[in-house]
Image (cartoon, coloured by chain):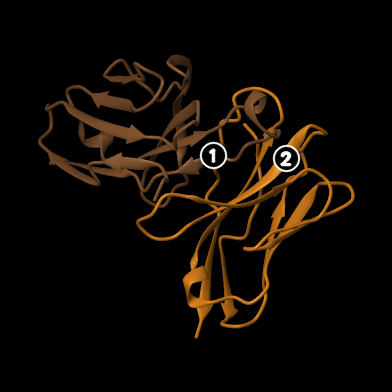
Amino acid sequence: DTGVSQNPRHKITKRGQNVTFRCDPISEHNRLYWYRQTLGQGPEFLTYFQNEAQLEKSRLLSDRFSAERPKGSFSTLEIQRTEQGDSAMYLCASSLDRSRGPSNQPQHFGDGTRLSIL
Amino acid sequence: DAKTTQPPSMDCAEGRAANLPCNHSTISGNEYVYWYRQIHSQGPQYIIHGLKNNETNEMASLIITEDRKSSTLILPHATLRDTAVYYCIFISNFGNEKLTFGTGTRLTIIP
């Protein structure tokens, strides 16, 4: 399967701890997105990368959150000093940008990392 | 933010066609209509997208009204595995194409 891969699938941690999630996009996809989804709601955009450059960050992404994509391939999302409100599903998606294929390339999602803060 | 209106829930009998409506009255000329679905405990799955013409693929058909203010996703022969939350989204052909999800339609296929 060459889809978007996210690890771990589940993470349980105590409040105040740091956590890091990893996303491996579909190979050759140069765009990578992070979303967050809470119970009963649709996913909300957090940030996105084009290659290694982080081009946009949502206001939802507080200073405790940092995302990287050092070589333009996999990405990590770190949350420092976790809080109860950080409990959510964290989703990663990838796509080609328009310059590398037909216009409007759909985003393809992984199955997410479910974070639970105790 | 791009706004769509969908019914919160629908039921459909197994084997019948499921027709899921979406209103997007504020859509502009360069914005595409996308449909995704999300099965419990999985990430959203891309289904289909279109600009102004009707589209069909192996999963579904998309019917867009002539004024583009609404669309219907059609699953021609619904199966139990089609039970999911279905999201209608419109995004510009320009920019970063970040997706703005609403709360979608929870479709339940009845055996």
Q: Position of residue A108 (x, y in %)?
A: 50, 43
* Count of numbered tags: 2
Give the residue drawn at x 56%, y 36%. B99
Residue drawn 59% across and 24% down? Answer: B96
Which chain does the numbered disc 1 sit on?
A
Up the image or down, A9 lies above or below A95; here it is: below
Mark 2 lies on residue: B32
Left or right, residue B86 beside residue A91: right
The amino acid sitting under disc 1 is: Gln
| CA neighbours of label 1 inside 10 A, class few (<14), some (14 to 19), many (20+) | many
Q: Secondary structure at mark 2?
A: strand
Which residue occupies the extreme bottom position in the image?
B111
Q: Quadrant of residue A15?
A: top left
Tell me the distance, in whole angstroms, between the alpha carbons under discs 1 and 2: 13 Å
- Which class describes the residues within 10 Å of circle 2: few (<14), some (14-19), or many (20+)? some
Query: Residue under circle 1?
Result: A107
Q: In the rendering, at what x and y percent does residue B13 appear?
A: 58, 82
In-image side of A17 versus A74 (left or right): left
**Chain A, which colour?**
brown
- Asked whether A107 or A27 is in front, the reply is A27
The one nearer the camera, B91 or B3, is B91
Query: Percent x, y for residue A71?
Result: 36, 17
The quarter of the displayed image where residue B2 is located: top right
> Which residue shows up at 41% across the image and 20% down it?
A72
Q: Colour of chain B?
A: orange
Residue sitting at x 59%, y 77%: B12
Residue lying at the far right in this picture: please name it: B66
